[in-house]
Image (cartoon, helix red, strand yellow):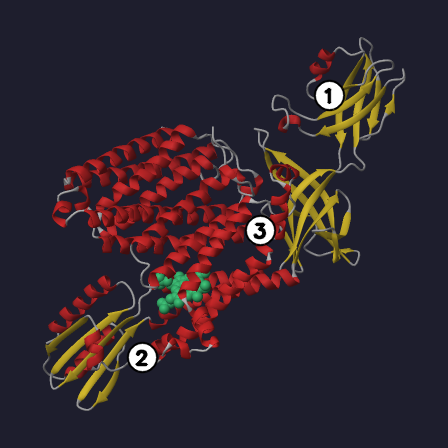
Amino acid sequence: MSSSLLFNVTTFLFLISTILFFVFLASRNSSIGLGASLIAFVGWVVETGAIILRWKESYEMGHGHAPLSNLYESVVFFAWTIILIYGLIELKYKYRVIGAFVLPFALLGMAWAQLGLNSGIEPLVPALQSNWLLYHVITCFLGYAAFAVACGISIMYLIKAKAEGDVSSEMQAGSVIGMFPSIRVLDDLNYKAIMIGFPLLTLGIVTGAAWANYAWGTYWSWDPKETWSLIVWFVYAAFLHARITRGWVGKRAAWLSIIGFAATIFCYLGVNLFLSGLHSYGGGGK
Amino acid sequence: MSTNKRNFVESLWDFFCSLKLSISLLIGLALTSIIGTVVPQGSIPPEYLQTISESKFKLYQSLSFFDMYHSWWFMLLLYLLTVNLVSCSIKRLPRVWKMVFEPQLVMDEGLEKSLSLTHEFKISGDAVTKLKDFLASAVATPVVTETDGSTHLFAQKTPWCRLGVYVVHLSIIIIFIGALIGSFFGYKAMVNIPEGMAVDTVYAPGDKAIKLDFAVKLEKFSVSYYNTGAPKEFKSILTLIENGQPVKGYEKVPVIVNDPLSYKGITFYQSSYGQSGEGSLYHFNVSRRGGSGGAQLDLKKGEQVTLNGGATLEVLEATQDVRQFMPEFSGPAAKVLLKMPGKAPASFIVFKNHPEIEEQRKGELVLEYAGADEKLYTGLQVAKDPGVWIVWLGCALMTIGIYMAFFLSHNRVWIRISNGRVVMGGTASKNPAAFESKFEALVEKVKALK
Ligand code: HEM
């Protein structure tokens, strides 16, 4: 059994889970919902195995390193962290329907990785041979994943808030939207997801700075990736302060969360695709 | 307070204390920071200059876009953020401080009304002792206050977590202080050292020479490769020399990427390498096609040597491993310029491991390359930053502060006992839903006390 087979199985399971989540939305059948999240979690377990296997395979090739060193490996890991954070939030707050707005992010990541990216296991260039790589990448991606979940919740918020403005509540009760948690709950969950993501992003930036200082002697050099991570950090800091002043909860907070996630994605992918800098190793399409 | 009575200072103070200003500054910093990721910073590549018009270039330059993170307006935003942070804290901290260190010990009627969680019940026997023990085991040792006829108990958990926000804000200022110290008292510099040589001067940007009070000698430099041809390790073996003597413990220290060497607050990082033109010798054997034997030649780079017969040979470039440039070949290779008398000069590559290529060239002379005694130089980044520990202190404080602000809650419980009537009230600074179930559990336990 190879890791790439397991990654394919993962992708397939995420696809089934996403479809079931949409059927769940349409049918409001709670056992379909349960099936959708169970399959997502099985996919997550399979993916965990695949990541460990890939790690082992890299040792067998003679240049063992954690599978976090190129674009393919990071996209796969991103999908893994998204399901992890979603799983934690579902276990804690029991709003299964959020999965319908989160699973597509993980599916998109896996599908892109499997179909569009070079999955070869490469030896590490000298710049990446450091344990800091592990601490830095894991904290950053857990943070990104929490922001992805917050973004999914914010999209639900906007849909629900719009529907509440448009149609009467009896009509709503019969539609897909009726299954969404109330907008107050969505607003609160958005905040909670960002409360998970913000400390992790902060740790990601700090470990990145520590690594840069250890490897190059400068903890901050305004390289585009660093700068974009700070931009993301500013946006979410603005979000947190906005909540304290009245009038910024609700729609505006949801938009800030979506903008924050867009900035996150640009920080992760856009910088490598469109800008140049120290982190350019992250590139590497087929 | 009517607006027209306020003087200028007061409205300025309000301006600096406002959260609207903080949000605007944070968003402003996010937006302006984008400029420096799109416009090149520092030295501008010539290709970029061709893509923008002269007037645009002048505009960008006058706005300091090419060094925007050090421009006056970006600094101004950061200073405003600092002033905003400090004023906000000065305004709010006293109230929070009081809440933490001088808590309200008595639940009067006003407080009781403001609490969303209250419960009233009766209790028999020595209610005060029972409830005191109960609070001590379930929440925290309570403070007892007697007022006219009533006894008040107050217990709280993690009150200091309310200071978390201020710890975060303070940490930002500490990081700024560390960065300022680094920029005033530290430097970043570069130095190239050829193998076997020692230097005691490094160069900051703008070729500013900085003399160290010790010297760095490069004993040896080496590169190793993976079997794919990708570089695996760059290694400088360094010895530090002080007063003409090697420094104990700093002799023949290997320095690789991600593993620097520090001495007296100055750190050396492996950054680049190259062939040091000085002293390298390239070994060739030249013979006539079909002939035997031939002549041994030791060439220096860029030096033209005349062979007997009138031809001249010069080494243009050489490498110890050609794989990085031509993956289909391996081993050392040299690019040479050969001028045969009466013919056009020819430039071609001679491979140590691939003599068949030279066979195919079908020249009058056959060259064999025997490799080189090459001298390399190492490029080291040199940094001194006395502020870096303050920056790390700030980062640690920020992490602790964020943890306090996000994940700890200040929970308070009051009990008032008067004439056998007991009222219990509680509140939490965070997560009201979770506290509600905790409070209900407390009520259940209190009821079981009877
Ligand atoms: C412009 C400068 C800033 C000002 C004036 C400011 C002001 C404030 C104020 C007044 C609060 C609310 C305190 C309360 O609960 O009463 C707060 C909360 C907070 N601030 Fe700031 N802040 C600034 C910058 C930052 C930055 C750059 C960060 C980045 C980490 C930050 C992190 C936080 C956090 C984590 C909270 C707690 C939010 C929550 O509990 O949801 N602040 N800030």
Chain letter for the residue marked with disc 1 in the picture: B
Which residue: 19% across, 91% down?
A: B148
Chain letter for the residue marked with disc 2 in the picture: B
Q: Is residue B80 above or below residue B287?
A: below
Question: Alpha-carbon distance for marks 2 and 1?
Answer: 85 Å
Q: Residue furthest front?
A: B4
Look at the image and tell me in which quarter the N terminus of chain A lies: top left
Would you identify the image quadrant in which residue B208 lies?
A: bottom right
Left or right: A22 as drawn, with respect to B287: left
Question: Alpha-carbon distance for marks 3 and 2?
Answer: 46 Å
Q: Which residue is more in the foreground, B276 or B53?
A: B53
Spot occupied by residue B306 in the image (x, y as percentages of width and height): 88, 22
Left or right: B263 as drawn, with respect to A12: right
Residue mark closest to the camera, 3 vs 2: 3
Spot occupied by residue B167 in the image (x, y as percentages of width and height): 44, 67
For the residues beneath circles 3 and 2, the answer to whether they share a chain is no
Chain letter for the residue marked with disc 3 in the picture: A
Q: Which mark is residue B350?
A: 1
Residue mark closest to the camera, 2 vs 1: 2
Q: Are marks 3 and 2 in contact (CB under 8 Å)?
A: no
Q: Amino acid at mark 3?
A: Ser
Mark 2, residue position = B103
For the residues beneath circles 3 and 1, the answer to whether they share a chain is no
Q: Which mark is residue A221?
A: 3
Spot occupied by residue B168 in the image (x, y as percentages of width and height): 44, 64
